[in-house]
């Protein structure tokens, strides 16, 4: 990967964070799509039987940002730490997943553990590659708790119901996606 000026990388990260805040405020994650190259890839693993991969800006917008983020309206993803490697053109951001509803004791519903995103910068204020990680077991446990207490949003309930009817677009058995999780742009 090529080197980029440090100030450009820092500015890109700030644009990303600002756009994330806008998306959270508007409950519309699709604004992030323009921050990817036309041929970017974005994926993550969901355990031993499922991984997700969006190939190209259109799939990132329509499948990753609309379908996969659907039902998470009101959730926030505060970045706790960001590491920038300007020599490799890479960024790693570690974030939390916090719901907009609270438990009876006033504590927020929040996914335990550390979530993160690993980005490869392509210049021109765009990512060419993103891979996320999070503890799917903790996500599932939190959603089950929210279902039990009647606090899971209607949108997420619908999203979960759609996934029970069969595989959603972008979901693949491990090793069968059009781009592998470790495949990087040339």
Image: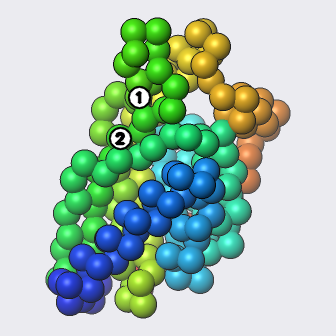
* Residue 88 rendering spot, x and y as whole percentages: 22, 80
Q: Which of the two residues, 181 or 139, is positioned nearer the viewer here?
A: 139
Q: Is residue 29 left or right of residue 129?
A: right
* Residue 179 rendering spot, x and y as whole percentages: 55, 67
Identify the residue at horizontal 20%, vertical 89% (top origin). 5
Report the number of numbered marks: 2
Q: Is residue 69 above or below residue 23?
A: above
Dividing the picture into quadrants, the one containing residue 60 is bottom right
Q: Is residue 82 left or right of residue 21?
A: left
Q: Is residue 61 above or below residue 74?
A: below
* Residue 46 rendering spot, x and y as whole percentages: 51, 40
Numbered label attached to residue 110: 1
Residue bearing mark 2: 96
Q: Which of the two residues, 86 or 28, is positioned nearer the viewer here?
A: 28
Identify the residue at horizontal 62%, vertical 24% (top origin). 152
Q: Circle 1 sits in a helix, a strand or a loop, which is it?
A: strand
Q: CA distance from mark 1 to mark 2?
A: 8 Å
**Within-10-Å neighbours for mark 1: few <14, some 14–19, many 20+:** some
Dividing the picture into quadrants, the one containing residue 148 is top right
Dividing the picture into quadrants, the one containing residue 93 is bottom left
Location of the N terminus (image quadrant):
bottom left
Q: Is residue 54 above or below residue 34?
A: above
**Within-10-Å neighbours for mark 2: few <14, some 14–19, many 20+:** some
Viewer can see residue 182: no
Q: Is residue 42 above or below residue 109?
A: below
Q: Is there CB contact under 8 Å for labels 1 and 2?
A: yes
* Residue 44 rendering spot, x and y as whole percentages: 48, 52
């Amino acid at each position: 990967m090529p080197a980029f000026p440090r100030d450009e990388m820092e500015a890109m990260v700030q644009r990303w964070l600002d756009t994330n805040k806008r998306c959270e405020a508007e409950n519309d994650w699709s604004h992030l799509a323009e921050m990817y190259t036309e041929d970017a890839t974005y994926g993550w693993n969901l355990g031993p039987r499922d991984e997700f991969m969006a190939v190209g800006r259109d799939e990132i917008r329509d499948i990753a940002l609309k379908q996969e983020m659907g039902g998470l309206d009101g959730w926030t993803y505060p970045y706790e730490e960001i590491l920038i490697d300007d020599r490799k053109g890479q960024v790693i951001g570690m974030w939390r997943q916090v719901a907009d509803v609270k438990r009876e004791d006033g504590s927020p519903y929040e996914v335990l553990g550390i979530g993160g995103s690993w980005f490869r910068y392509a210049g021109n204020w765009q990512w060419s590659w993103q891979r996320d990680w999070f503890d799917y077991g903790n996500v599932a446990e939190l959603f089950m708790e929210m279902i039990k207490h009647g606090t899971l949003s209607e949108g997420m309930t619908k999203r979960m119901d759609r996934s029970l009817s069969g595989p959603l677009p972008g979901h693949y058995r491990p090793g069968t996606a059009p781009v592998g999780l470790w495949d990087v742009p040339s």
